[in-house]
């Protein structure tokens, strides 16, 4: 066991790492589609052809999917190596340190296309660079998440630390969603005429900031002092098979996947919701995400209190069903007899409540599952559990991006917006399905 409980300052130091990679991964969710296939009233040229494969899959959706197929191989390998790693600084920190600089560089390169017009060269470039970005970020995220069960022994401690992590993640969403507003300022103050260049400067600044945040846990966490785990000895195939036959964990993964599909559709679609459905400026999207997140913070004390008194399972079920119903309402944005700002900010306030619960409880639940399994089997496979969860999370984000990109074929421009509206319906229905599936989950 750790020599002493993790202090609040070291908990905050650990949480800064999540703030960093949340910024990085949410920039992809917020900006990738908008940057490469913007609406016709954005002031930017389309950079990737809207050609389809089998009449359904857009090129951008296939690029996103190819990155996840690559992750299907790399995620469990990195987890396996981390679980078995021997190093004076521990099993996790060395991996995290090696991943930061490549994550920043590849993240910036994602938004530096070869040509600033519709080009198949951009397709191949983006596919290769995105694979490098996700591999680099995976090398950081999986060992980082695997620290959680050891840093927070006991259910109450896990909920508290998960609260800090959730706060960090949603702050990352806020910062990444400010990209359009930053681009506006760069164009105004820096006299940058090209909208693509303004976005690139804003995105590059945020990636560098994210990398700085990812450095902080390297100095605030000492695995020898704060952790108690021992390298696992179980073979890769056996460890992977054991986790994939863990019924409770599989139920969790299915629901978690569906949640990330839905939240990615919200992130990917936000600029379209405000620009196309409501005819507002792009910068409003960042304010909407900020209001949603800040309002959700008001419910964090309630989440912590209820998590110690009510089954986490019931709280997650209620949250998934509520979020699904609210997302279905996006279909009617622009058609409701209310001012556009009232509509979009009202949506943000409604979404904030279930996302407060879904931002905290899943981290606590998976940490409990991994710890309980380690106590039962004598093999601490935290990284492997989080690797599968990490792959599921990124797969959910990819399906969200793919679904949104595919549905843009049905309309993504003013007065031709059916695809954008149907994307919200798809996300909402999937979230409701996840809530029903989670009724089969058994509290650890």
Image (spheres, rainbow, N blue to C red):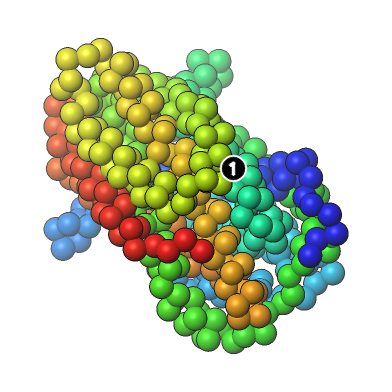
Image quadrant holding the N terminus, namely bottom right
Is residue 392 positioned above or below 180 on the image? below
Q: Residue at x 51, y 41 (%)?
A: 306
Is residue 379 positioned above or below 225 on the image? below
Question: Could you say which quadrant of the image residue 268 lies in?
Answer: top left
Q: Residues within 10 Å of mark 1 (few under 14, many from 20)?
A: many
Is residue 221 positioned above or below 68 on the image? above
Can residue 103 be seen here? The reply is yes
- The x, y position of residue 22, in whole percent, is 55, 45
Can residue 394 be seen here? The reply is no
Instruction: From the viewer's side, name the closer residue of 314 and 83.
Output: 314
36 relative to 91 in the view: left or right: left
- The x, y position of residue 291, in whole percent, is 46, 24
Residue at the top extreme of this rendering: 339
Instruction: From the viewer's side, name the closer residue of 276 and 340.
Output: 340
Q: Residue at x 74, y 61 (%)?
A: 93
- The x, y position of residue 305, in whole percent, is 55, 39
70 relative to 23 in the view: left or right: left
Q: How many marks?
A: 1
Question: Could you say which quadrant of the image residue 116 lies in?
Answer: top left
Question: Could you say which quadrant of the image residue 124 lies in?
Answer: bottom left
- The x, y position of residue 354, in whole percent, is 40, 38
Q: Residue at x 31, y 40 (%)?
A: 322
161 relative to 425 in the view: left or right: right
Q: Which residue bears the numbered disc 1?
A: 163
Residue at the front extreme of this rendering: 309
Q: Residue at x 36, y 21 (%)?
A: 345
Instruction: From the viewer's side, name the closer residue of 27 and 12.
Output: 12
Is residue 374 positioned above or below 101 on the image? below
Task: Look at the numbered disc 1 and give the secondary structure of its residue.
Answer: helix
């Amino acid at each position: 066991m750790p020599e002493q409980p993790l202090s609040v300052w070291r908990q905050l130091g650990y949480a800064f790492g999540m703030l960093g990679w949340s910024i990085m991964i949410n920039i992809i969710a917020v900006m990738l589609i908008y940057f490469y296939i913007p609406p016709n009233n954005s002031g930017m040229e389309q950079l990737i052809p809207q050609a389809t494969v089998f009449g359904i899959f857009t090129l951008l959706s296939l690029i996103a999917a190819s990155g996840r197929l690559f992750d299907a191989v790399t995620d469990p390998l990195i987890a396996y190596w981390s679980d078995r790693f021997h190093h004076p600084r521990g099993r996790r920190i060395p991996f995290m340190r090696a991943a930061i600089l490549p994550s920043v560089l590849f993240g910036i390169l994602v938004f530096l296309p070869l040509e600033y017009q519709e080009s198949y060269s951009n397709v191949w470039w983006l596919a290769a660079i995105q694979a490098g970005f996700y591999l680099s970020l995976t090398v950081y995220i999986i060992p980082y998440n695997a620290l959680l069960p050891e840093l927070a022994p006991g259910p109450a401690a896990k909920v508290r630390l998960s609260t800090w992590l959730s706060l960090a993640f949603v702050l990352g969403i806020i910062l990444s969603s400010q990209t359009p507003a930053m681009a506006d300022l760069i164009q105004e103050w820096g006299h940058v005429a090209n909208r693509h260049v303004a976005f690139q400067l804003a995105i590059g600044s945020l990636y560098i900031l994210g990398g700085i945040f990812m450095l902080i846990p390297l100095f605030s966490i000492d695995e020898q002092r704060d952790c108690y785990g021992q390298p696992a000895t179980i073979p890769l195939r056996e460890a992977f098979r054991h986790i994939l036959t863990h019924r409770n964990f599989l139920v969790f993964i299915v629901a978690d996947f569906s949640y990330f599909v839905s939240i990615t559709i919200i992130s990917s679609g936000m600029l379209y919701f405000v620009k196309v459905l409501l005819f507002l400026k792009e910068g409003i999207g960042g304010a909407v995400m900020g209001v949603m997140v800040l309002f959700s913070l008001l419910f964090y004390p309630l989440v912590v209190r209820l998590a110690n008194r009510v089954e986490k399972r019931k709280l997650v079920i209620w949250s998934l069903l509520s979020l699904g119903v609210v997302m279905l309402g996006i279909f009617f944005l622009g058609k409701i007899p209310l001012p556009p700002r009232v509509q979009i900010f009202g949506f943000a306030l409604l979404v904030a409540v279930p996302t407060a619960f879904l931002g905290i409880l899943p981290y606590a639940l998976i940490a409990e599952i991994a710890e309980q399994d380690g106590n039962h089997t004598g093999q601490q496979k935290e990284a492997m559990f989080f690797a599968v969860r990490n792959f599921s999370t990124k797969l959910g984000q990819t399906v969200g991006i793919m679904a949104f990109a595919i549905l843009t074929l049905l309309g993504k421009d003013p007065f031709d917006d059916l695809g954008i509206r149907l994307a919200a319906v798809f996300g909402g229905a999937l979230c409701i399905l996840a809530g029903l599936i989670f009724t089969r989950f058994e509290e650890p």
